[in-house]
Amino acid sequence: MTRTPKPRKRAPRTFGQTKAASLFARLAENRPDPQTELNFVNPYTLLVAVALSAQATDVGVNKATKDLFRRAKTPEEMLALGEEGVARHIRTIGLWRNKAKNVISMSRILLSDYGGVVPEDREALVKLPGVGRKTANVVLNEAFGHPTIAVDTHIFRVSNRTGLAPGKTPDEVEQSLERTTPPAYKNGAHHWLILHGRYVCTARRPKCWICPISDLCRFKEKTPAPRQISSLGPKPADLEAGPSMK
Ligand code: SF4
């Protein structure tokens, strides 16, 4: 008896570099100098802010770190504040107890093993308590200018929806983005995709009608423009596409 061969699963198609270049060129046009929306004053406070941002919004983290960073901008100052002191400042964000513990342990290791300086090295960073690959990639990109792409929920969604870099896991998407993103756009890719996901390609009801990459995007169920736009003119909220960096 001959067996019917099973149909082979095709790997999802990624963008070619030319199409990816057009996509990034358009996102870059609107935000030529993209930056993280987390507040920080040096690589150490960036590391702490990104670690605190897991399962919390940037706005929430900025509120919590406003006073925290006024009191402590270095590992020494954070250790002097102590776990209870850190906890008091960050109580408004999720998982604060654990995060306070991690911030103190991380600061202790930075002092004992790295002279109080944040290492410019992914392997060293991910060994710090509370620091995963995503946090390490953000710090390497933002503080040291490495062309790393940290895949968060926004980048995961945008990469899959558009077809730019599909993947089932954040690691798969990261590898796919590494291959697809043209070198000229690697430094800013992380920010452009996050901001696009946060303000335009939102999880619910993406704003396809104002999207600058709509014609390149493979998402089939594009959101039509609200009726007010065609009949009465746009509502300010409909045109809100986040802060332009221009
Ligand atoms: S067209 Fe819609 S789904 Fe595609 S990237 Fe733009 S906002 Fe997202």
Image: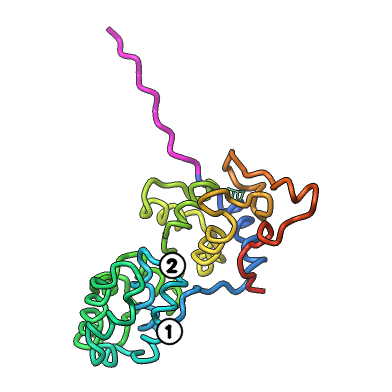
Mark number displayed over residue 165? none
Mark 1 belongs to which amino acid? Lys
Q: Which residue is nearer to you in this view: 193 or 1? A: 193
Q: Which residue is mark 1?
A: 66
Which quadrant does the C terminus fall into? bottom right
Q: At which x and y percent is residue 157?
A: 48, 51
Q: Secondary structure at mark 2?
A: loop
The residue stretch that appears in magenta: 1-13
Q: Is residue 70 above or below residue 226?
A: below
- Residue at the top extreme, as displayed: 1
Q: At which x and y percent is residue 155?
A: 47, 57
Q: Is residue 36 above or below residue 193?
A: below
Q: At which x and y percent is residue 54?
A: 35, 66
Q: Residue at x 51, y 69 (%)?
A: 187
Mark number displayed over residue 57? 2
Quadrant of res 129: bottom left
Magenta run includes residue 235: no
Q: Which residue is nearer to you in this view: 124 or 235? A: 235
Which quadrant does the N terminus fall into? top left
Q: Residue at x 39, y 74 (%)?
A: 139
Q: Residue at x 38, y 51 (%)?
A: 172
Q: At which x and y percent is residue 49?
A: 38, 76
Mark 2 belongs to which amino acid? Thr
Q: Residues within 10 Å of mark 1 (few under 14, many from 20)?
A: some
Q: Is residue 125 above or below residue 9?
A: below
Q: Residue at x 43, y 67 (%)?
A: 57
Gap in angstroms between the C-alphas marked 1 and 2? 14 Å
| Labels 1 and 2: the sequence-earlier one | 2
